[in-house]
Amino acid sequence: MNSRDVTAVLGVLAAAWPNQTITEQTARVWMDLLADIDSEDAMAAARILIKREHWFPSVAQFRSEAEAQAHGRHNRAAATRGLPGPTTPVLPERLVDATREFLAERGTKKHWHGGPEPCPVCGGIKPGDPT
């Protein structure tokens, strides 16, 4: 972020916490420590912190929320391009096929365990039965 972006973020935060005094020294510290944060992520972090926190956030708290916003933005961008993100598991096709085959086979096996319905716990595979 540049100095104009930091000033805008601090202005929004100061409006939400009107009793908080923003000194020139405070602004300089925030500018130094938030220079690598994207301005879009910073504004999103400010909005979230305003909704969630009772007290004016520390720089560390603000950085943490801004980094979470950047991570979420990266995941959303990857999803729109059809790329797997860190939260999207990619399974090998043969594992998916083997799982489907196993589930289809399991659904055909029945046993009773002495009750009127197939066993809901084991899904129809009798303990100790080799089939």
Image (tube, rainbow, N blue to C red):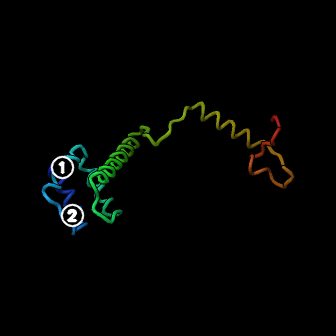
Name the residue furthest left. 24
> Does residue 21 lie above or below 82 as drawn?
below
- Residue at the location (39% across, 44% down)? 75
Residue 82: percent from left, percent from top: 42, 39
Q: Check disc 1: other Cα within 10 Å, few if <14, some if 14-19, many if 20+.
A: some
Which numbered disc flags the more N-terminal residue, 2 or 1?
Answer: 2
Name the residue furthest bottom. 19
Residue 53: percent from left, percent from top: 34, 63
- Residue at the location (87% across, 52% down)? 114
Residue 38: percent from left, percent from top: 25, 46
- Residue at the location (24% across, 66% down)? 17
Q: Quadrant of residue 79?
A: top left
Image quarter of the C terminus: top right
Front residue of 18/89: it is: 18
Q: Check disc 2: other Cα within 10 Å, few if <14, some if 14-19, many if 20+.
A: some
Looking at numbered disc 1 in the image, what kind of residue is underneath it? Met
Front residue of 111/62: it is: 62
- Relative side of 4 to 66, left or right: left
Secondary element at tag 1: helix
Secondary element at tag 2: helix
Label 1: which residue? Answer: 31
Looking at numbered disc 2 in the image, what kind of residue is underneath it? Ala
Disc ID at residue 14 = 2
- Relative side of 49 to 82, left or right: left
Instruction: Find the distance from the CA under tag 2 to the CA under tag 1.
Output: 15 Å
